[in-house]
Amino acid sequence: MANYKIDITKDHCPITFVKTKIELSKLAQGDTLEVLLLKGEPLENVPRTSTEQGYTVLSIEPVDGDIYKVIIQK
């Protein structure tokens, strides 16, 4: 299982999930993607939309201030 990372803290919805989905599409089944994003819309939308698209959200945890780390498995 390979692990990948993207930082979308400078992006805004809906680009946050678009970039996340593009990265997820490159992964092999079982790989994980660590997504750094901001509290608010990105934190609400990326995990929810990922789940709706059939991916598994393994964890959501605060990193620093308004930045969160979301681990998504394909």
Image (cartoon, rainbow, N blue to C red):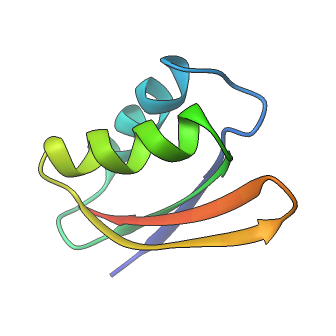
Instruction: Give how far across and how far down residue 25 sits, in percent.
Output: 28, 41
Q: Report the label total.
A: 0
Q: Is residue 41 above or below residue 15?
A: below
Classify residue 35 by image quadrant: bottom right
Q: Nearer the viewer, residue 3 or 53?
A: 53
Instruction: Give how far across and how far down residue 31 sits, in percent.
Output: 31, 70
The residue drawn where x is 87% and y is 60% is 65
Q: Nearer the viewer, residue 21 or 14?
A: 14
Q: Which image quarter holds the C terminus?
A: bottom left
Q: Residue furthest bottom?
A: 1
**Residue 4 visible, this orientation:** yes
Q: Residue furthest right?
A: 65
**Residue 23 visible, this orientation:** no
Q: Is residue 39 above or below residue 29?
A: above
Is 49 positioned to the left or the right of 11 in the image? left
Q: Which image quarter holds the N terminus?
A: bottom left
The residue drawn where x is 42% and y is 37% is 45
The residue drawn where x is 62% and y is 64% is 69
Q: Nearer the viewer, residue 30 or 16?
A: 16
Is 4 positioned to the left or the right of 54 in the image? right
Instruction: Give how far across and how far down residue 53 sits, in percent.
Output: 16, 41
